[in-house]
Amino acid sequence: MLTLILFLLPLISGIFLVWNKSAGLAKTTTVLVSLAQLALFIYIGSVFYKDAAALEFSRSWLSDFKVSFHLGLDGLSFLMTGLTVVISGLILLATKDLNYGNISRLLGLILITEAALIGVFAAKDGFLFYFFFELALVPVYLMANLWGGEGISKITLKMFIYTVFGSLFMLVTFVVLYLFAQTSELSELAKVSAILKPGLNNLLFWGFLIAFAIKSPLFPFHGWLPDAYSKSPTPATMLLSGLLSKMGIYGILRILVPLAPAGTAHFSGLVIYFAIVGLIYGSIIAIQQFHIKRLIAYSSFAHMGLMGAAALTLSASGVQGAAFQMVAHGFSAVGLFYVAKIIYDKTGSRSLADLGGMSQKAPKLAVLFLVILLGSVGLPLTNGFVGEFLMLRAVFDFQHILGIVAVSSIILGAVYLLRLYQKTMFGPVTSFTENIEDIGTKELVVLVPIALVIIITGVFPNCLLELSSGFADTLSLIK
Amino acid sequence: MTLSLLITLIPLIPFAGFLINGLGFRNIPKSLVPLIGTGASFLSFLCVFFTYLQFNGDPVIVKLFDWITVGSLNIGFTFQIDQLSLIMLFVITGVGTLIHGYSAGYMSHDSGFGKFFAYLNLFLFSMIILVLGGNYLMMFIGWEGVGLCSYLLIGFWNKNTNYADAARKAFIMNRVGDLGFLIGIFLIISTFGTVEYGAVFSKATSFPVGDAMITAITLALFVGAMGKSAQIPLFTWLPDAMAGPTPVSALIHAATMVTSGIYMIVRSNVLYTLSPFTLEVVAWVGLATALLGAVIGLFQNDIKKVLAYSTVSQLGYMFIGLGVMAYSSGLFHVITHAFFKALLFLGAGSVIHAMSDDQDIRNMGGLWGKIKITAVTFLVGTIAISGIPPFAGFFSKDEILAHTFEHNKLMWILAVAGSFLTAFYMFRLFFVTFTGKFRGTHEQEHHLHESPSSMTLPLIVLAALSVIGGFLGMPVVFHAPHYLNDFLSPIYEGSRTVQEGFGHVHLSHSTEWILMGVSVGVAAIAIFLSYTIYGKGGSVPEADQEVSGLKKVIYDKFYIDELYNAVFVQPMMRFSSWLHSAMDNRVIGGLIRTVSGGVAETSNLLRRIQTGNIGTYVWLITLGVIIFLGFSVGTEVWTSLKSISK
């Protein structure tokens, strides 16, 4: 029941805010709901550690098809749900003070996204998973269209085509499995899938993979990403990079591997190679970007590649590393895009060519930006290091040469991220940056928690790692 | 106080200093800032000292908590105190404290005073973690931590784009090395199943000498050492790193951080002893670096650049020592070098201070009488690095040379040639700077002054250490105890197990006397030569445009930076642009454009149907319903088909 409330609270308040017009009421509601969600999640945590089964919720939904509304939390779901609650809260907190028209509707859409994501991460039924997986994009799509700049409709259309394309594959795959199992309960689907012919299992693998590879995205399915990330309004970008991209990796772990084990065994190697190509490819492109959001977009894409590759190694190090990195990257990506937005609002430019010297004018911003950036660089004692270390080790164990190629991304990451930092914060001030002021409380309440999480989970990663260890064990059995 | 608390305090105090100065530097009075910074460093030194008093010879391991646990791998947040970490800690916190004190004077006019001390303390914390950590991943924390601090401090005056570039270059080149280090760690995990020193080294003793996996591990780790300790081919960041304030050059880029690579190899001595091939590589890379650094140092005219290349060169000597399995000698040179090179850098800082921030030795001259303390202490440092007994550098360098002679005669000849160059260019630096006539502007001359006592006091202490530091380890022929070797002996337990006769010198006393005589003689000739040209001769290096021929090639550092730029940087930039425009925009982007071209018409159609934005929503819902209906109808049809077929 608690899980259901965690899902319903943002959904209902979100729908309310979409219809509501008053900005003041919207902001108050947002803060209250975020805090309530956090408190509720902490309470759920206390229950979770005693008896996770108590958090299950199941009702018959489409009884004719034996589809049930089945939510529940295991370690991995708990981790991802927690990420969703906290990151959504931070995005809401950041957005409510940003200069957008029709703010109530915007906040409402974010809340609906949050609800859908909680649904995705807690769903124990295949159809329910699919439903939420699709639902999550709708509000983000609307946000991009309604608040995006020039030419956004073309970009969102592109994103939409990609996504629908992937989703159709996933839907068909679910239907096929459903026909064999006569239920859409994930645990039952896994049992059926295990006894299917390998040939069919291979098809299931590709059916699921395309959907998740597009969502993450993994190379070469990322054609929609650079424009969508850089042209969407920042709240939508933060949602996409911080949370929605994680649905892809989560889907690989939760759906793809358990439901297509034979296919995974057969093809995962190939996908790992492609994902690592994406890691290097994205990193190299990021080196020469001048548009801040585009640079972060490619960086984010590169990071997703490593997560995808590591998850598919199915080793404890890879799976737990990917799970950990989903959290780490969630925070650093949202932090970086938020900083990009702050810089834009202060200077009116997103081009590295225009900026410089901001650390003299805005030292607080410079420090917090640095911490978030170092998390993304993967410096030890930030959470980015723990994730990257485990994932790179997994890829290295999978294949040494490929591992060395993957490790070279730590050099490329330093190249483009330090360039980003230097061109904005260091050097002489420019006409764009000479009159800016430092950040104030409303930015600090978002950036300081992000910076603290980056450091604390980097020093004490085990508190998150142990959540995914049970799940990693079950996956390694499949291997 | 319990020992484990004491050990924990060693890194914790500088970290607290960092937090206090870093978070509160706007509110802390300026007089208090250096007190907190230097105090933290000194307290940390005291903790090291008291730890040493309680240390009984057996390694002390303090596990604070489990850091990363995944599968069967459990990496602890552990500290390890043993002979090696104690020695390093003494050098780091001791020299560190002196340099903190010096900075109080040197940086007093800088607006970022508090920030500077915060960074210095953060550096100290990272460096302490590097040597105090009880496993390879802890070392890696410190390893990258010092890299970050180095980045922040080189780019301390980052308004200047060149300085910021130098900082970035240092970080990125170090990351190239870190790639090797990480791969080394991965291999260690897959080979030994752990990264804790004790377990790794005891398991390693069961491997045969020349084992391929051990060779791979040691080579990978050495790549890390090349980056951090500025060896060929990853050395070009260090001369550029001189963009940082001079105390930074002394502390990070001479005395401590750059010696991390040597520490790493001495720490892993069992592994290296198991791999003669890697040792050979280490020795030759060290030798090549020692010579290259010395040759480039011959013609540099920036006082800090000369010292930077000399550091590159001296680090090379340390690696030669390691490569010929004289681990303690390499470490011995780390210690004495920390004294005299810190002294030289701080002295250079004092000169630069006196010269109103001019670093070009061609504008100096005749400073001997003007800044007496600086000049005398600088001379002490110069003698020490040149290898004249009984100054510190002589003993450590002589030990390395003696072991090299035993290992490979050719290597020894080249190494001695390098020490000839060292003595020559160091005395060139000294004579051009301090003797002859003053060549700077009137304004500079008017401004010439000795530095405040906060700066000269560290110079005097370091000069004293540069004189007596060598007595830590006297040559065998002197029949005096070699304190350092005796103290360090336990950490080579593993090496002794895997290699019979480890640590025994087979040179006869007469050979040793001859070797010593040769190296002193060579140095004396070099100094004499330098004196005739630059001292008595009074010649001054020519202006930049007059340099030509081979000399210009050397003066321009063999164009190695330009080479790297042309071979690595530019192609990567072009490749990046090409990938973006040709691949990503056209191919990957085009992939969908063909599809979306077809859809574009539909979309236009749809856009016309849409009445405002809510329309999109309706459209989406409709689509969802269609998918959903299609799903349910399809299933129904399918089930009925199935029932019919039955």
Image (tube, grey):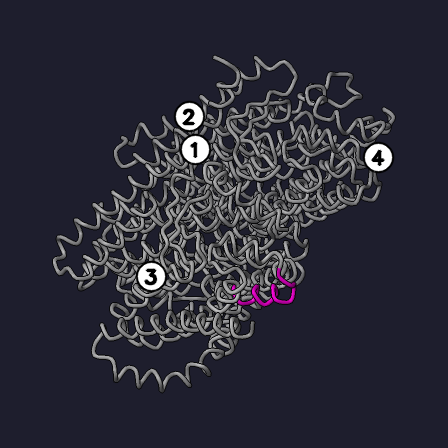
Determine which quarter of the picture holds residue B570: bottom right
Mark 1 and mark 4 lie on one chain; the one further toward the N terminus is 1
Check disc 2 and give the amino acid type.
Answer: Ala
Determine which quarter of the picture holds residue B208: top right
Quickly name the residue at label 1. B121
| Secondary structure character of the magenta stretch overall | helix
Check disc 4 and give the amino acid type.
Answer: Glu
What's the distance in space between the residues labelled 2 and 4, CA to CA?
Answer: 44 Å
Co-location on one chain, circles 2 and 4: yes
> Residue B430 colored magenta?
no
Quickly name the residue at label 4. B406
Q: Percent x, y for residue B42?
A: 45, 23
In the image, residue A252 above or below residue B209: below
Which disc number belongs to residue A355? 3
Which disc number belongs to residue B40? 2
The range drawn in magenta is A196-208
Tag 2 and tag 1, C-beta contact below 8 Å: yes
Q: Residue at x 15, y 59 (%)?
A: A20
In the image, residue B577 above or below residue A376: below
What's the distance in space between the residues labelled 1 and 4, CA to CA?
Answer: 42 Å
In the image, residue A252 above or below residue B329: below
Horizontal side of B170 relative to B632 (left or right) equals right
Residue closest to the eye, A125 or B197 = A125
> Residue A198 colored magenta?
yes
